[in-house]
Image (tube, helix red, strand yellow):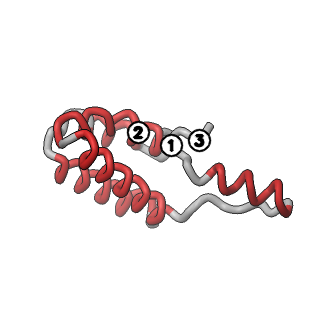
């Protein structure tokens, strides 16, 4: 249940402690989390393997986001990590900060 939503653990803990219904992070926080995770994968696995492994994680993060299927297809064909970052940032700018 936490694939693509690592903040859900905090939400569950808040609810169990106090009954508080903690909202999901704002879109820009989600983007920052994705980019931080992506960078960590690149550093750990190297550029080539990290980019390949990151594809499934990016898909999980963005599975329920509007019109992400098109961007996901483009990202899955990228081999340049900077291009992946640019496509994610552009997507969030267009669809998630309105």
Name the residue beneath numbered marker 2.
57
Image location of residue 55, percent across then percent down: 32, 36
Residue 3 in view? yes
Mark 3 vs mark 2: which is more N-terminal?
3
Name the residue beneath numbered marker 3.
2
Name the residue beneath numbered marker 1.
4
Which picture quadrant has residue 80?
Answer: top left
Disc 2 to disc 1, how far (Cα)?
6 Å
Please state which of residues 30 and 9 is positioned toward the viewer in this rendering: 9
Indicate the secondary structure of the residue bearing disc 3: loop
Please state which of residues 91 and 28 is positioned toward the viewer in this rendering: 28
Query: Dot 1, how many residues are within 10 Å of its Cα: few (below 14), some (14-19), or many (20+)?
Result: some
Image location of residue 34, percent across then percent down: 40, 53
> For residue 75, which numbered disc appears in the image?
none
Q: Is residue 17 above or below residue 74?
A: below
Indicate the secondary structure of the residue bearing disc 2: helix
Answer yes or no: do the residues labelled 2 and 1 have beta carbons within 8 Å?
Answer: yes
Indicate the secondary structure of the residue bearing disc 1: loop
């Amino acid at each position: 249940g936490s694939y693509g939503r690592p903040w859900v653990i905090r939400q569950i803990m808040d609810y169990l402690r106090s009954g508080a219904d903690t909202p999901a992070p704002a879109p820009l926080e989600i983007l920052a989390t994705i980019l931080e995770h992506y960078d960590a994968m690149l550093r750990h696995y190297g550029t080539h393997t990290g980019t390949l492994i990151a594809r499934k994680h990016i898909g999980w993060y963005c599975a329920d986001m509007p019109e992400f299927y098109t961007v996901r297809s483009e990202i899955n064909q990228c081999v340049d990590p900077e291009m992946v970052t640019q496509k994610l940032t552009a997507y969030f700018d267009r669809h998630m900060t309105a």
